[in-house]
Image (tube, grey):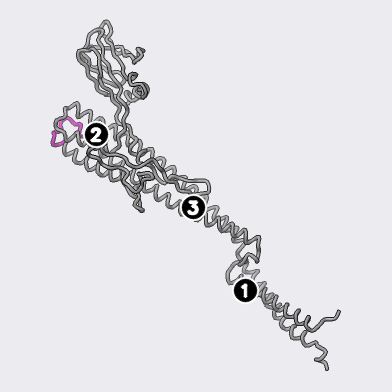
Amino acid sequence: MRISTNQVYDQAIRGVIDNQSDLLKTQNELATGKAINSASDDPVGAAQVLRLTQEIEQLDQFKTNNTLLQNALSTEEAVLRNVTSSTNRANQLIIQAGNGINTQADREAIASELAQIRDEVIDLMNTRNADGDYIFAGFQADSPAFIFDATATGNKYQFQGDEGQNEIQISDTVSVANGDSGKEVFEDVLARLKSSITGGTATSSSLKITQQDTFDAFHSSNYDAVTAANNVFTGTVNGAGTQVDFTDAGGTNIGTVNFTSGQPFTFQGVEFNIAATAGQTVEFTLSQPEKKNLAESLNDVVTALNDSTLSSSQLDEALADALVGLENGAVAVSDVTARIGGRINIADSVLESNQDLEIANKDARSKIQDVDYAEAVANLSKQETALQAAQQTFGRVTQLSLFDFI
């Protein structure tokens, strides 16, 4: 086969250029530490690296979200812990206020400290996070969760947020609420359930709740939120005047207790004192359940302790209302605190899982993308030798022209 001079030169130059290109590629791999520096190096590998990089970046964002979530939950948990501490102290003071040897000045001194606790609690209920958002206001985070309205006829400390809960995504499939609405934590707290004498033919009658748990169970089982008439119960003195038969609105007997006119007796946690003869009756009605937040319960007891016109029985009722309100509020706070702990546990578990995935993805990407230095150095040495050989042979081959021998 006849080889032209141009073919000799083209082939020799192509060999030098190819070896230079291979050497440059290997040098670039050693310089960057990556075996794939452009998609043309390994199209399939480059696509896999891109996908793994996206997953790693997403996991990194989830890690950031997890940190934000745990910070928010830790803040809320600390606030609720302080609320619990404050209400525990308020409980002690309210019990102390019920001591019969207290003077009005003593009660007012206790009321002063309770007022400070009230202000502290309302401040905690309006806690802000680092961004200035009110953490218990739901989606209305730009405004305080609770406000004081001195002109209100009912509760003066009123919730003005909503029930919204923001969620933070911490994995592909897991989103966790980063807080709780103040409506659930503080507002939806049952006040003390009550009853009152509303009728009857007895000469005189009165009642007071002495066993709150027993009465609460009776109230929960018998209260009718739809038909008010069904909440009226009647006690009738029997013919011998020795017992009282209690019936519901439908006339069904719900219990019988021994009776002596003018002597107190207890039925379903309620202590009755009735002066009546055979056939006379007393009617009592279950009160409608009400809700009262912690600040309102504290405010009411402060008002009662400062009111010197209240009778002993009225003061006892006010103190009992406050104790039950604070107890129910503490239960609500405790329930939410427990849920916060559960969310933190979920966040910890998901974070650990995400970290494992991140390590696995980085390892997989490294195997595809990162250069094998030992192999690359060996290739570099081999390519340098090949390039030198190509350059040396180029000179010799180009001197094989017939004219070189004339």
Residue with the mark numbered 2: 153
Label 1 secondary element: helix
Apparent side of residue 227 relative to residue 208 in the rendered image (left or right)? right
The label number, if any, that marks residue 62 in the structure image: 3
Q: Is residue 318 above or below residue 235?
A: below
Q: Is residue 102 magenta?
A: yes
Circle 3 — which element?
helix
Q: How far apart, in angstroms, are the residues tagged by discs 3 and 1?
A: 37 Å
**Is residue 227 highlighted in magenta?**
no
Q: Are marks 2 and 3 in contact (CB under 8 Å)?
A: no
What residue is rendered at 52% in x and 57% in y?
57
Q: Amino acid at mark 3?
A: Phe
Magenta residues, start to end: 91-106
First in residue order: circle 1 vs circle 2? 1
The numbered mark, 2 or 3, whose residue comes first in the sequence reads 3
> What residue appears at the point 36 percent right and 14 percent down from the top-left corner?
250
Q: Position of residue 248 (x, y in %)?
A: 34, 15
Element type at mark 2: loop
Quarter of the view holding residue 311: top left
Q: Earlier in the sequence, mark 3 or mark 1?
A: 1
Mark 2 residue crowding within 10 angstroms, few (<14) / some (14–19) / many (20+): few
Q: Is residue 13 above or below residue 267?
A: below
Q: Which residue is mark 1?
A: 27
- Residue 337 picture quarter: top left
> How far across and down, in percent of the image, does residue 223 sit?
35, 23
Question: For the residue marked with disc 2, what is the amino acid?
Answer: Thr
Name of the residue lying farthest toward the top: 239
Residue 386 is tagged as none
The secondary structure that dominates the magenta segment is helix
